[in-house]
Image (spheres, rainbow, N blue to C red):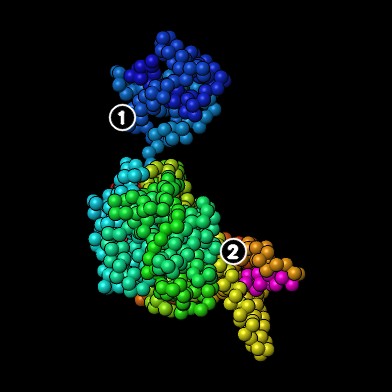
């Protein structure tokens, strides 16, 4: 081993450093250096050979040896006057004087070192700069947001700010500490305990009437669900199953006797329950469920039965372990007639947890995520329940079996009963968005601190300063803000509707936004994971858990693709009805209006405008979204009509254009989101908040135009030059919003205890 305290060895250390700097020493490089070293008679023979022994490509130095050389060079350089602009020869000559007798090398020795350096044909100054150059200390990240973070938080929290603050405080209590060490069985019990704590706070019963522990405010319940989603999502889903689906179905589909019997105990979790709708064979096709409920007038009982194995209830939350009662959706048969799907209260377990006679229960087992929720399967073998267990708000059966309903149309009755799912869809959309907010908060904070690369001899650059990093996170942040306000408006309108009011328009919007929001969550969490690099893959970063737990959000409470097809089908029905109801004068006016719209929107001057003010303007952005949605609706209507005119079966025609239908629904969702975002911004008084939200609105809209440029180009709505300007406009808005990025995620108000991500919560002023 070389003695790095020897002046002769220290003199040639820079050469050894550069020889092995890239980990590979070629034969010609090794021979050049060895030849030069052996010619140095100012180095004694044994030292020359020891040095040459470290120049064998077959026996490279160990990592320990190499870094010992580097450390000796750096420490020696600190004790001399050399700079990062010196040559290898100058560095060697300088560090040779450190230690030993401190004598300087002779001029001949210095020239010899310079000759070796020249023979190698390298840029010594650059290599010394890499070795000794120390970048200046980076300055801590700062927020340059023009607004007060707390003020924006108040805007986001809206009318339920006090409730949200209460929940944030609760979630920071040690009783809600994450327990990643628990196995599945213990995790399920922990989630149950958490839900019991929430019930003790009165949060489970919020949507129920005052007589049963609540205040009758569905908006407060959804705000609770959304805020809880900053914490463990298994807890959130179990909370939703118990208090939203099970208790909510009894509240909305039952009558006073059901409320008296079940609501209070459901709201306190004294009576754990399930919502048993989905079946293995039918999934989203609720109308065709096969579980039956046959009325027996002799005993005044309904007989609940699973007719075959594929008709069992599947993925039922709370069923595998904790649920004692289920709201079961089944085909009601009485007096020789089938009256379609209705809901029944069916006991499934005794108080000690034993399945009731003729009820079979299985555990769905481990899942991709949400393993704190005990999903199960249910079979019923001629299970008898009292006639009173029919949830009879919209239909009743008399003791003699006579069926009666205030809604004569079976189709309307079915969809009215299913309106109980609207609140669930809005809640899932908002919970998914909370998860996206958590992922963005982690990724933006990390990107603001993690530094990598940069100009020579300058501080390394925060990841969030790179264009690619800004582009991967900031448009998604803008979309998250847009969705927040769209869902806030939808929640407010849903909560304001009475139980007997028509929810058709709200249901269509809930379907569109649930699908759009949960797809956005899935995309955003993947981007957040990648934006955190390897750190994002760590379990304690929490993004992986968020990804796994929210993946199913695109499927439950309505499969997203099916929901989007329903949205498109509704738009087509409205479109057809509009034409059907028009007289000749109305039709003429419609055609004239459409022509005027096309002339205005496709004006060559407008389609070619590329200046920033135009691209960011509300007129351009709302016009683009509206034009796309309207044109897609007309185009898909024409496609369907051509197929049906050619004698294609209507169902087959609908299937044949499903790709266009999903695109139409997607365009309609973005139109609605933009309009709701604009309305929310207009209602804000604080000019600093309004300015930042306007920039987010501009980025959301322009980024969505960019994402669909193929359609806009094909439709002639933009020219190629304008398409290029749109991309530039997205870049410019990302640059403008970058200084505000951390303040914008901080405004979500997510407690660090909920994030539980070291890279986003520890030592915020230091590089992660």
- The crowd level at tag 1 (other Cα within 10 Å; few <14, some 14-19, many 20+) is few
* 684 horizontally vs 267: left or right: right
Marks 1 and 2: CB-CB under 8 Å? no
Reading the image, the residue beneath label 1 is 79
Q: Which of marks 1 and 2 is nearer the N terminus?
A: 1
Q: Does the magenta stretch include residue 644?
A: yes
- Local secondary structure at mark 1: loop
Residue 146 in view here: no
Circle number at residue 52: none
Quarter of the image containing the C terminus?
top left
The residue furthest top is 45
Range of residues picked out in magenta: 632-645
Q: Position of residue 755 (x, y in %)?
A: 34, 52
317 shown above or below 646: above
* 233 horizontally vs 723: left or right: left
Residue drawn at 32 percent across, 72 percent down: 257
* 575 horizontally vs 768: left or right: right
Nearer to the camera, 415 or 347:
347
- Local secondary structure at mark 2: helix
Q: Is residue 481 magenta?
A: no
Reading the image, the residue beneath label 2 is 662
The residue furthest right is 646
Q: Quadrant of residue 438?
A: bottom left
Q: Position of residue 668 (x, y in %)?
A: 55, 70
The residue furthest bottom is 585
Give the CA separation, mark 1 to mark 2.
70 Å
Residue drawn at 49 percent across, 29 percent down: 22
Q: Quadrant of residue 81?
A: top left
Most frequent secondary structure within the magenta stretch: helix
Residue drawn at 48 percent across, 24 percent down: 19
């Amino acid at each position: 081993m070389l003695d790095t305290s020897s002046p002769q060895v220290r003199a040639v250390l820079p050469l050894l450093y550069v020889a092995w700097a890239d980990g590979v020493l070629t034969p010609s490089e090794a021979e050049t250096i060895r030849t030069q070293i052996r010619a140095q008679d100012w180095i004694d023979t044994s030292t020359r050979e020891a040095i040459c022994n470290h120049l064998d490509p077959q026996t490279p130095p160990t990592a320990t040896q190499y870094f010992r050389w580097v450390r000796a060079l750096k420490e020696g350089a600190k004790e001399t006057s050399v700079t990062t602009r010196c040559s290898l020869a100058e560095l060697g000559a300088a560090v040779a004087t450190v230690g030993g007798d401190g004598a300087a090398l002779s001029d001949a020795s210095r020239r010899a070192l310079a000759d070796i350096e020249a023979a190698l044909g390298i840029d010594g100054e650059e290599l010394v700069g890499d070795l000794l150059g120390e970048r200046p200390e980076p300055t801590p990240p700062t927020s340059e947001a023009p607004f007060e973070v707390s003020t924006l938080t108040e805007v986001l929290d809206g009318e339920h700010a006090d409730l949200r603050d209460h929940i944030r405080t609760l979630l920071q209590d040690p009783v809600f500490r994450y327990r990643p060490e628990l196995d599945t069985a213990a995790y399920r019990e922990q989630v149950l305990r958490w839900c019991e704590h929430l019930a003790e706070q009165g949060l489970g019963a919020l949507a129920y009437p005052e007589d049963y522990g609540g205040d009758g405010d569905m908006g407060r319940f959804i705000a609770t669900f959304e805020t809880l989603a900053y914490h463990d999502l298994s807890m959130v889903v179990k909370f939703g199953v118990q208090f939203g689906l099970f208790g909510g179905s009894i509240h909305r589909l039952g009558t006073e006797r059901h409320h008296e019997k079940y609501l209070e105990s459901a709201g306190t979790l004294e009576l754990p329950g399930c919502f048993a709708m989905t079946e293995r064979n039918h999934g989203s096709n609720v109308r065709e469920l096969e579980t039956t409920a046959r009325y027996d007038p002799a005993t005044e009982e309904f007989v609940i039965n699973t007719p075959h194995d594929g008709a069992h209830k599947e993925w039922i939350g709370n069923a595998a372990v904790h649920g004692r009662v289920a709201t079961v959706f089944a085909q009601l048969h009485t007096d020789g007639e089938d009256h379609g799907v209705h809901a029944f209260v069916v006991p499934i377990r005794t108080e000690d947890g034993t399945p009731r006679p003729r009820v079979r229960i299985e555990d769905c087992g481990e899942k991709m995520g949400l393993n704190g929720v005990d999903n199960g399967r249910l079979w019923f073998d001629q299970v008898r329940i009292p006639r009173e267990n029919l949830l009879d708000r919209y239909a009743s059966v008399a003791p003699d079996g006579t069926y009666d309903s205030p809604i004569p149309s079976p189709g309307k009755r079915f969809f009215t009963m299913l309106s109980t799912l609207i609140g669930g869809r809005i809640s899932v959309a908002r919970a998914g968005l909370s998860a996206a907010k958590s992922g963005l908060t982690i990724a933006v904070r990390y990107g603001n601190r993690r530094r990598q690369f940069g100009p020579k001899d300058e501080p390394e650059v925060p990841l969030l300063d790179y264009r690619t990093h800004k582009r991967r996170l900031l448009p998604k942040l803008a979309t998250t803000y847009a969705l927040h306000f769209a869902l806030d408006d939808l929640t407010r309108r849903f909560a304001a509707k009475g139980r007997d009011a028509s929810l058709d328009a709200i249901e269509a919007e809930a379907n569109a936004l649930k699908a759009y929001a949960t797809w956005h969550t899935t995309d955003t969490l993947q981007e957040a994971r990648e934006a955190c690099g390897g750190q994002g893959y760590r379990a304690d970063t929490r993004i992986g858990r968020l990804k796994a737990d929210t993946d199913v959000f695109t499927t439950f409470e309505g499969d997203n693709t099916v929901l989007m097809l329903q949205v498109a089908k509704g738009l087509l029905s409205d479109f057809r009805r509009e034409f059907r109801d028009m007289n000749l004068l109305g039709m003429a006016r419609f055609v004239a209006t459409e022509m005027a719209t096309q002339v205005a929107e496709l004006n060559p001057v407008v389609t070619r405008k590329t200046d920033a003010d135009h691209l960011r303007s509300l007129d351009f952005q709302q016009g683009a979204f509206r034009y796309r949605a309207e044109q897609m609706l007309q185009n898909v209507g024409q496609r369907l009509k051509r197929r049906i005119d050619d004698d294609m079966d209507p169902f087959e025609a609908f299937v044949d254009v499903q790709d266009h239908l999903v695109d139409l629904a997607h365009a309609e969702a973005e139109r609605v989101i933009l309009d709701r975002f604009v309305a929310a911004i207009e209602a804000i008084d604080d000019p600093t908040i309004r300015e930042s939200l306007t920039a987010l609105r501009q980025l959301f809209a322009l980024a969505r135009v960019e994402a669909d440029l193929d359609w806009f180009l094909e439709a002639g709505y933009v020219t190629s030059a304008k398409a290029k300007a749109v991309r530039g406009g997205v870049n410019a808005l990302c640059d403008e919003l970058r200084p505000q990025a951390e303040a914008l995620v901080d405004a979500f108000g997510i407690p660090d205890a909920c994030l539980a991500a070291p890279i986003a919560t520890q030592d915020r002023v230091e590089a992660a």
